[in-house]
Image: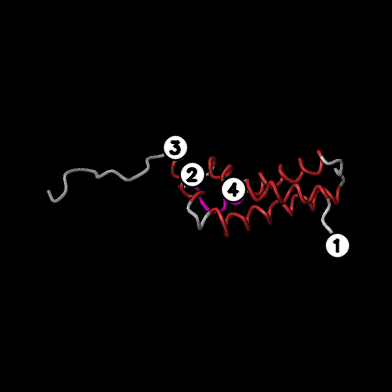
Amino acid sequence: MPLTNAELWAAALGYVLPPVIAIVNQPKWSGAIRALFMLLVAGADGLGSAYFTGEFSGKAAITCVLTAAVAIGVAYHTVWKPSGIAPGIEVATSTGSRAPQPAGPQGV
């Protein structure tokens, strides 16, 4: 079964969204919170793709959300994470300290 325009847009946007997600993600967050945020972004991607292509109905919208979630996950784990781009963005935009500082003089 061929993909619809909405599904293609959801997949294409999903492929380039991991660096955008990395701007918000924090290295200190648990895996569950990171996954939940990714699913929220995939929902926005899929619903937006379905709406702007004029295919905003129940089945089409859900299919677009699922397509976006798969595209984001595959792109992150095959391109953005191995290249170090997404983790680098997360560290660069982290709100916490970047490296632990020593508590006091060493060896005393």
The amino acid at mark 2 is Ile
Q: Position of residue 17 (x, y in %)?
A: 62, 45
The amino acid at mark 3 is Thr
Please tell me which of labels 4 and 2 falls first in the chain. Answer: 4
Q: Are marks 1 and 2 in contact (CB under 8 Å)?
A: no
Residue matched to label 3:
95
Please tell me which of labels 2 and 3 falls first in the chain. Answer: 2
Residue at 50 percent of width and 49 percent of height: 85
Q: Secondary structure at mark 3?
A: loop
Please tell me which of labels 4 and 1 falls first in the chain. Answer: 1
Q: Which mark is residue 89?
A: 2
Please tell me which of labels 1 and 2 falls first in the chain. Answer: 1
Q: Position of residue 108 (x, y in %)?
A: 12, 48
Q: Position of residue 15 (x, y in %)?
A: 65, 51
Residues drawn in magenta: 29-36
Nearer mark to the viewer, of 2 and 3: 2
Residue matched to label 1:
1
Q: CA distance from mark 2 to mark 3?
A: 12 Å
Q: Which mark is residue 18?
A: 4
Q: CA distance from mark 1 to mark 2?
A: 37 Å
Q: Are marks 2 and 3 in contact (CB under 8 Å)?
A: no
Quadrant for residue 91, please give it: top left
The amino acid at mark 1 is Met
Residue at 58 percent of width and 60 percent of height: 78
Residue at 86 percent of width and 48 percent of height: 58
Residue at the extreme bottom of the image, as rendered = 1
Judge from the rendering whether residue 3 lies leftward or rightward of residue 98; answer left or right. right
Q: Is residue 32 magenta?
A: yes
Relative height, residue 9 to residue 83 (above, below): above
Quadrant for residue 21, please give it: top right
Q: Position of residue 46 (x, y in %)?
A: 75, 46
Q: CA distance from mark 4 to mark 2?
A: 10 Å
